[in-house]
Amino acid sequence: MGDLSFESIEIVQLMVTIEQHFGLKNLASEELLMRDGRYVPDRTVEEVTQFVYDQIQKRK
C-alpha cells in the first residue's frame, strides 16, 4: 500500500484485521490486491476504503 509504505505481509494483516473488525468473512481481498495473477503493491488508502465499503454494501 503505497500511501503507508506497507509491505505485502502488512497488507495481508490489515485485511484480516478489517475482516475481523467488520465481521466480514471471506473478504475478496484478491480483487483488491491482485491483477492478472500478480500482487499490486501500489494501492492507496482511498482504494482500500472504497473496497471495504463496497464489500459491506454487497452483503446488506
Image (cartoon, rainbow, N blue to C red):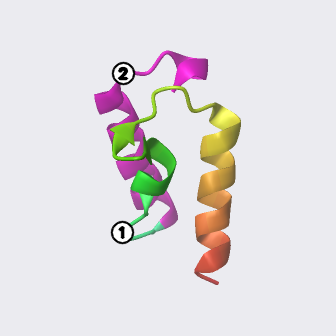
* Disc 1 from disc 2: Cα separation: 21 Å
* SS majority, magenta: helix
Q: Position of residue 53 (x, y in %)?
A: 67, 60
Label 1 is placed on what type of residue? Asn
Q: Which residue is mark 2?
A: 7
Return the residue nearer the eye: 28 or 18.
Answer: 28
**Magenta highlight on residue 9:** yes
* Residue at the extreme left: 9
Q: Earlier in the sequence, mark 1 or mark 2?
A: 2
Rendered-image quadrant of the C terminus: bottom right
Are the residues tagged 1 and 2 within 8 Å (C-beta)? no
Residue drawn 51% across the image and 49% down it: 32
Looking at the rendering, which quadrant does residue 48 occupy?
top right
> Disc number at residue 26?
1
Kind of element beneath mark 2: loop
Relative to 46, residue 18 above or below? below
Residue drawn 66% across the image and 42% down it: 47
Residue drawn 61% across the image and 69% down it: 56
Residue bounds of the magenta highlight: 1-22
* Residue at the extreme bottom: 60
Kind of element beneath mark 1: loop
* Residue at the extreme front: 36
Q: Position of residue 57 (x, y in %)?
A: 67, 74
Label 2 is placed on what type of residue? Glu
Relative to 29, residue 35 above or below? above
**Magenta highlight on residue 13:** yes
Question: Taking 29 as reference, is 50 left or right?
Answer: right
